[in-house]
Each structure stands twice: as structure tokens, then as C-alpha cells.
Amino acid sequence: MDGPLTAAILIVSTTAAQVPSSDASASALRDVFQNDGAGKWDEPLVRVVSDDTIQIQRQLMAWTDGPNPINFIVTTGGTGFAVADVTPEAVRPLLHKEAPGLVHGMLAASLAVTPFAVMSRPVAGVRHKSIIVTLPGSPKGATENLQSIIKMLPHACQQAAGANSRALHKGGVKELESQAGIGASRDQPQGDRPQQHHRHGGHGHDHSHGHNHGHGHGHGHGHGSLVRHTNPNIAPLSNDPQLGPTRRHRESPFPMLQVDDALALITQHTPEPKIVTAKVDEHIVGSVLAEDVQARENVPAFRASIVDGYAVVVPADGNIKGVFPVAGVSHASPGEIAPLKEGQIARITTGAPLPPGATSVIMVEDTILKSMTDDGKEEKEVEIYAENVKEGENVREVGSDIKLGSAILSKGDHVSGVGGEIGLMAAVGVTEAKVYQKPVVGILSTGDEIVNYDRPGDLRLGEVRDTNRITLLSAARHWGFPVVDLGIAKDQSSSLEETLRDGLRSIDVLVTTGGVSMGELDLLKPTIERSLGGTIHFGRVAMKPGKPTTFATVQVKDNDGERVTKTIFSLPGNPASALVAFHVFVLPSLQQQSGAGAPGLPKVPVMAAHDFSLDSRLEFHRAVVSVGRDGKLSASSTGGQRSSKVGSLKSANALLRIPSGKGETLKKGSTIEAWMMSDIHC
Ligand code: AMP
Ligand code: MG
């Protein structure tokens, strides 16, 4: 990694959020980056939030989940035992990997200064490509903690950002220590670590006052008595489903991503396609080739006649007028053919091989029958009228359509259902080809209220027929992907976890619907993160419908015991939202995983057939695109667009990407982008 590393400081303090001038930690920590950072750090960004789980998580995720993640983020404050102290609880669920070494390092440094360091509850770890460390709230404690780890961090940040670890480690620990500007502790017991100066400096008194590890509000209360700032009955919010509805987040902590940013994350985290050898038969249709394909044979494989007529041996002057004996016949059928000599001709049909020695073919139209055999069934002599006949006339030479060894198809070509590509492979004797394996898609509905769509009898109060599973199974199959029906899971962490685990064993891409809103039974996100150890790449998108669409990856062992990445798309439960989200987000990932170069629905500009009123979010409006009398494409709404309205997708062939703009109108006749889901109506 070149250039300086990026850093950010998150001040977690309700006081500082109200009175920014009350914060002293930001400038103290900035100084550490500058003075102790060995010139490796950019000027850190600074933000202030209250002691509020959502605010903390939002800001951290804004720094870690975007396209340019911050390398190293420190929070300061909220790590103590006061009721309002929620920083570790806010940070821990965001971490994809914990880093207890950093925690121990900081605690050891603080303990060397004061035994009250036990009152701090730091956490540290990695989210995506960023390292996050919680520091105590007092400027002094925060400074010392950061000083104790900062020298080691450039290396860790480079690794977290994806640098090649082998290259980083090739010089061994000694090399790392010298790069970090530190001597090994075993060689230099006093090192240059700040806490050791303190230990020997004997400033114990100073620390017992200055270290406000517990409270994190910059009040400097010391450790003697804990000060409670909030009502003890208020417990921190958590995404742990065990804690029940009173402790759930009251707003989604996931940052609201723009559709294009969400799509970029999908592109980034979709696994590489697998390559398999496939037989060239109708099942290969829809696959993408993973190799260039060469002709295994010449086409034609023999010199063939282009017309019905007579094979001749043309003399040098090209003049072949006269009466000739018909020496033989060549039909388009395999077998031996007698050679032809000058002065003889042989009857030949279209596509039949030329007799050895023949140079050209004269069309039957340029000849007259002169005499027949005695039984009247065969031609005996034929008169030819042709002048200036060239060698090779009316002959398809060997390999003149396709040469043996020439490239007929390229890696990345799509074997279409139109037939051109499969025909080409069939013509040149290619019977198998390497293709990208299509991912197997598992579809799971969730919800205690959901019943099989074909369950006989009337619905009881609260029951809902499972619309999404059959719809998405059909849609995935329509786009050419093998599907597995995973049934309906109950809204219970344990059964959901089991169903997800089972599903992940047999499929490559898991698509679930329901359970991603803000209800206490909406368990998908916590189950993916907490039980499956998955990584949620986004959990909210600025679009209508489909806002809670969630995209995650999990690592699982495949049948050979190798760790592989599988993708999970958790779509909203409302049927229209689920189907729109499938086309917008799942389809491009499936296509990418099967090697297709231009993922997603085809996009074409169309004309609005009527006014459309804009929403505050980008809208994917279900519409019918048809060719008007003027030959132009125009789009009309399918009507009511409420997310629960399945009917809004009936006969829809397109999603119109209508920009956001609350209170505004997109006028009839304006150009809009249509994402085509099926054929254009004519
Ligand atoms: P949820 O996201 O689970 O809160 O679901 C949102 C809405 O979609 C609720 O009204 C659900 O009953 C409904 N819903 C969820 N799954 C399905 C499904 N498979 N078929 C039809 N409606 C569903
Ligand atoms: Mg539900």
C-alpha cells in the first residue's frame, strides 16, 4: 500500500455532542497521530456523537463500509461501567474479527500506570478493511492507550486492507519491529513505550486523577466513585434477538446506501465463478464459455460441390465445351468415389464430395443430356456449354467455411438459445467445452404467518399464502439458474439458523424473503451475523420498494472441506419488493457468478407515456414498455405501486428507474431508463 494511512477519531460523548468545545480528546489524539505516528498517518477525521448505539454504529459503518474505508478508527469515551457507556456494545457486533492482542496491549499499558485501568472495557478488531479500537474517554487515558499501540498499527492496517501478508512478513518479527521503529521488548526492557516512562517516572498520583477510563465524558471524575448519568433502567440497545423487543434498535443501524453503491458491493463480494467441463448439448445453452474454443475439424471436411451438376477436370484454357461420357455419380453420402480423368465427367449433387482429380463443377443448367443407357435409366453422355471455367468453380474447398484449429468462439461468449454458438461447436466436432458453472440458488420464505400457497382450505386470521417462494423460484429458473426450494422457516432464531445452515450446504446463493424489517421477529440480520458468523455488506438501500434489502457473505466448508464464500440475499417480505429486489440485486450477482460480462437487466431509454410523481427515494416503478405507432418505446405504469401489491408486477416487463424528488413530477414525454425484465410488447 502506498501513501499515508487514513485515520478517524470518533468522540463518543453526549456532553461533547451538545457542547463541542468541552471535548479535549480530539486534539490530544490528533497530536498522538502526528507526534508518535512516524509520519505514516493522514490528518485524522473527527466526528462527535452522543452515547447512543445507533449513532456510534452509523458513523463507524459510514467510515468502514463505503468505497474508501478508513484504515484505522479510534473511538474515545463510553467504555466504562456507567449505564450510558455503550461504546463496546455498539462496536463489538460490527467487528468481523476481534483483536484481543490490541486490547491486552492497551490494558497492559494502562495497568502499568494505574490499577484503575481494570475499569476500562476496550474492544478492538477489524470490520471489512478497517481496524477499530475503543479508547477511554479521558484525554490522558486515550492518549496513553493510543501511544501504546500506534507503532504496530501501520502493519496491521496494511494487512486488514488486503496487502500480501507473505510479503509483509518476509523479514520476520525483527524486520517488523525495526519498520515500526521499536526495539524488541526482550532486548530493550524499557523500550520507548510511553507507559514505561511513567512507570519509572513514578507519577502514580497524577494517573489516579487523570484516568477517566470509566466514564468517557471528559468530566474527569477519577476512579473513586462511579457517577451515573442516566436512568439505570435504560439498557443499551442490541441486535441480540434473545433480549426481546424492548432492547431492539428502534431504527436500523445500517447506513442507507445508494443503489449504485449497493450494486458495487455486490460486484466486489460475489465469488469468482467456478469452471466446469460441460457436454455440448441443449443443457449448455445459457452458459458462458470459460475458454476459447478452436475448430477440431475443417468445414467442409472434404471438397464439396455447391450445386447440382457435373464434376469435371478443366483443361488449362478453361474451355470445356463438348460431349463427355458420364463416368460416375457422387451423391451427398459417405463412401469411396472413383477418381475422374480429363475427358470424363461425374454427376454430382449439392454438398457431395468431388471425385479425386476433379477441379470444378458445371451447373446442370449449363448442360444438355445427349444419350442414355440402353435401359433408359442412366445418363450416358452429356454436352457441356461452359467457357472460361476456373479451377475450383462451384467447389467449397476443405476448411473454406471454418479452418481446422481456428478460433470459433471466445472465452466469455454466451451460448445463446438462438442456436448460433451451439451450432458452430456441433459443426466442428467440439463435444465438450469449459464453461462457468451456474450457481445453484436456494429460495427460502420466512415468517410464522406464511403458509404454503396451495394449502387447501380458507386462511385463518393472520395467515398469508407464500407468494414469494414460487415467484422467485420461477424468476430464477426463467433466467436460467438451477433452483432449490428451501421451504418456509419459522421466525425463531434456532430454526432459522438450522435452515440457513442446511441450505448453505447444498446451494451457492441463498435468497430469503421476510424478516429484514424492524420487527422483533425480524431475525435474518442477527442470525446471519451472530449465528453464521457472516458479514453483512449492506442492510438498507435508498430505493422504493426494497429498502431493507440485505446482502451478506458467509464462509462455509464445501464437501471437500475447503472454505468457500457463499452469498446471502435477504429480501423484504412484501411480494412486489421481493421480486423487484431480486431483479435489481440478485440477478446481477447470479450472472456475475456464472461468468457473464454485463450483469443485470438490459437497460434502455424509453419515453414516459404519462406523468409520474416522484418519491423521496429512487423508485423502481413497475411498467409496461411497448412500441408505439411512431416506432418509439414508451412506458406506462402498471398502476398502484404499494410494496404488498403483487398485481403491480402482472404483465410488467420493465422496472423504470425513476429518480428521487419528493413533490416533483416527471412529465409525460420525458426520457426514463427502463430495466427490461422481459420482451418488449409490440
Ligand atoms: P417481513 O419483512 O417479514 O416483516 O414481511 C413484510 C410483509 O410481507 C408482511 O406483511 C408479511 O406477511 C409479508 N410476507 C412475508 N413473506 C411473504 C411471502 N413469502 N409471501 C407473501 N407475503 C409475505
Ligand atoms: Mg416476517
Image (tube, helix red, strand yellow):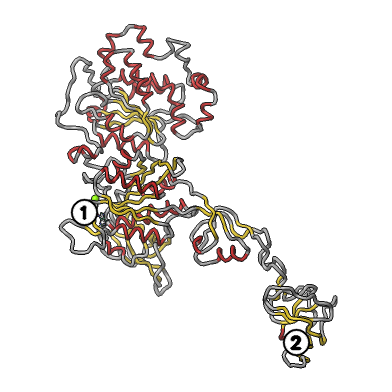
Q: Is residue 90 left or right of residue 130?
A: left
Closer to the N terminus: mark 1 or mark 2?
A: 2
- Residue 662 in percent (x, y) is at 27, 53
Kindly identify the residue that appears in the image at 25 percent across and 28 percent down.
Answer: 13
Ligand 1 position by quadrant:
bottom left
Instruction: Say if 403 sits above or below 562 in the image.
Output: below
Q: Nearer the viewer, residue 682 or 95?
A: 95
- Residue 491 in percent (x, y) is at 24, 47
Q: Is residue 536 left or right of residue 364?
A: left
Quarter occupied by residue 641: bottom left
Cβ at disc 1 under 8 Å from ligand 1: yes
Which of the numbered marks, if any, corresponds to residue 367?
Answer: 2
Q: Nearer the viewer, residue 278 or 666?
A: 278
Q: Dot 1: within a 10 Å radius of its alpha carbon, few (fewer than 14), some, or many (20 or more) residues?
A: some
Kindly identify the residue that appears in the image at 22 percent across and 64 percent down.
Answer: 456
- Residue type pointed to by label 1: Glu
Quarter occupied by residue 50: top left
How many marks are shown on the rendered structure? 2
- Residue type pointed to by label 2: Thr
- Residue 549 in percent (x, y) is at 32, 49
